[in-house]
């Protein structure tokens, strides 16, 4: 297929499906501006890679898979940027030295390490992996009630352990 023919097919793909792609991305991302940006990037990527979904029949399933993946990537990048920003803000708000930060990190890791395995597991899943209580319970193969009890005991143990340290005391 010549570049001219590819350009025509691609132009037709954009004309016929771009507004639908923007709507889809906007719904996925909850923001029209982000939806338009991600849809544009997805179409540019398709063009640059020379992907030709129109040669395989209906281009919509392929196009929407590309759009979905682009939205997922956008959300992941946004989470990373947000986390980096929050980390920078946290560092800006605190006057802790690197040595103090290291001591706090060691204390926290030590307190987590001192937990029973089941308690440590639910704390890590619930707070570090951000699973819901039900998802945590499913992951450890326990009931929600048993998982909540493990989590409560773990938090109490961490509070007692870390509360003794000057950095965490009241």
Image (spheres, rainbow, N blue to C red):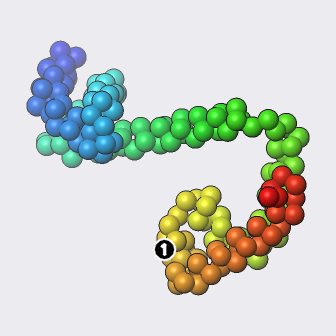
Q: Is residue 20 depicted above or below 37 in this figure?
A: below
Q: Is residue 102 depicted above or below 43 in this figure?
A: below
In the rendered image, which quarter contains the N terminus?
top left
Q: Quadrant of residue 154?
A: bottom right
Q: Is residue 42 depicted above or below 159 in this figure?
A: above
Relative to 114, 39 lies left or right:
left
The one nearer the camera, 47 or 64, is 64
**Residue to which mark 1 is pinned:** 134
Q: Secondary structure at mark 1?
A: helix
Relative to 145, 109 lies left or right:
right
Relative to 128, 3 lies left or right:
left
Q: Quadrant of residue 113?
A: bottom right
Give coordinates of residue 77: x percent, y percent. Answer: 49, 37
Relative to 58, 166 lies left or right:
right
The residue lying at 30 percent from left, 30 percent from top is 33
Q: Quadrant of residue 43?
A: top left
Which residue is most to the top?
4
Using the rendered image of the protein, determine whether residue 22 is visible from the camera's viewpoint: yes
The residue lying at 80 percent from left, 70 percent from top is 160
The residue lying at 82 percent from left, 58 percent from top is 169
């Amino acid at each position: 297929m010549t570049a001219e023919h590819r350009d025509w097919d691609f132009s037709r793909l954009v004309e016929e499906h771009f507004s639908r792609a923007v709507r889809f991305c906007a719904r996925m991302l909850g923001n029209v501006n982000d939806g338009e940006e991600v849809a544009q990037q997805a179409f540019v990527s398709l063009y640059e890679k020379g992907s030709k979904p129109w040669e395989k029949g209906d281009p919509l399933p392929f196009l929407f898979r590309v759009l979905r993946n682009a939205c997922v990537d956008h959300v992941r990048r946004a989470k990373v940027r947000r986390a980096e920003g929050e980390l920078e803000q946290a560092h800006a708000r605190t006057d802790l030295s690197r040595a103090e930060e290291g001591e706090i990190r060691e204390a926290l890791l030590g307190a987590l390490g001192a937990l029973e395995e089941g308690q440590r597991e639910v704390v890590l899943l619930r707070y570090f992996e951000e699973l819901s209580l039900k998802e945590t319970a499913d992951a450890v193969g326990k009931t929600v009630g048993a998982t909540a009890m493990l989590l409560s005991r773990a938090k109490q143990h961490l509070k007692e352990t870390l509360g003794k340290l000057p950095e965490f005391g009241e």
